[in-house]
Amino acid sequence: MDAPHDGTSSRRGAVRAPQSLVAGLGLIGLGLFGVWASSDLDYGSLRAIGPGLMPFWLSIGVAVCGLALAIAGFTHDGAPLQSFTLRGPLVISLAILAFAVTIRPFAIGGIVTPGLGLIVAGPLAIVIAGYAGTEARFLELLTLALFLTAGCMLLFGDMLNLPIPIFPTAFIQAMTGVLPSRTLLRIAVGVLVLAGLVLLLVQRRSGRREPIEVARHSLTT
C-alpha cells in the first residue's frame, strides 16, 4: 500500500517547502522596504531614541526571520503552495491605507484629510485588518483594537516619547494650555483600557446567555 500523502512528505528537488520559501522571500522584501523607507528618519541614540530607530531594527528583524524561513524551505520538508484568495491582501492593504490617511493630515489633490491621531487611526486599522479573515467578529476586533492602541500610545507616546500624533488635530488645538500633553495621553490610555474591559465583560456575559444546542440522536437497529 502507498503511504498516505499529507502534503508535507519528502520532496525531490532543491526546494522542499515551497510555502516556506515564498513566505520567507516575502518577509525579506518587506524588511528591505522598511529599511529603505526609514532611511530618511533620524535614528537618534539609546538615550534619545529617534523616530527611525525602531522601524529600522524592526525591519531588520523581519528580514532576518524571512531569511531563516527561506532557508528552511531548502532544508526541511513542508507544505506546497496552495491557492489563495485576494481578500486577505486587499483588506490588509486597505487597513494600511486607512491608517496612513487618518493618523495625520493627508493631502489628496485639493482635499486634505483631518489628522485623527493614533487614538482613532489605530483602532480603525486594526478593525479593518481583522476582516481579512472569514470569521471576524466586530466586538472582538474592537476590544483587541482598544487594548493594542492603548499599549502603543503608552509605549511610543509616553515611555519612548516618539513624535507620533496621538490625538486629533482639532482636539490638540482645543486642549492646548488646559492639561499637559502627557497627562492627556495617560487619561486617554485609561479610557481605552476601561472601554476594552467593558466590551470584554459584555462579550463574556452574552456568551453565557447563549442557549446550548443539544443535537438529537436517533438509534437505529
Image (cartoon, grey):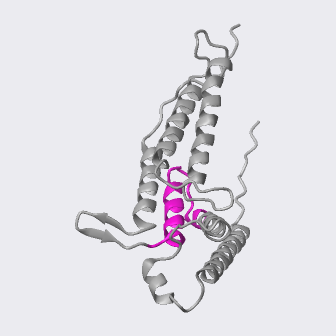
Q: Is residue 155 left or right of residue 123?
A: right
Residue 94 position in % (x across, y down): 42, 54
Q: Which residues are magenta?
A: 116-142
Q: Looking at this view, is 111 or 191 the one in front?
A: 111
Q: Looking at this view, is 188 or 124 the one in front?
A: 188
Q: Quadrant of residue 100?
A: bottom left
Q: Looking at this view, is 85 or 191 the one in front?
A: 191
Q: Quadrant of residue 145?
A: bottom right
Residue ID at (66%, 69%): 154
Residue 8 position in % (x across, y down): 66, 22
Type of secondary structure dominating the magenta stretch: helix
Q: Quadrant of the N terminus?
A: top right
Residue 182 position in % (x across, y down): 62, 79
Residue 143 position in % (x across, y down): 62, 67
**Residue furthest out toward the top:** 1
Q: Looking at this view, is 174 or 102 the one in front?
A: 174
Instruction: Confirm whether the magenta stretch covers residue 140.
Output: yes
Where 165 sits versus 77, above or below? below
Where 29 sits versus 188, above or below? above
Q: Quadrant of the C terminus?
A: top right
Residue ID at (42%, 48%): 90
Instruction: Confirm whether the magenta stretch covers residue 189.
Output: no
Residue ID at (63%, 35%): 64
Count of picture labels: 0
**Residue furthest out toward the bottom:** 178
Residue ID at (57%, 47%): 56
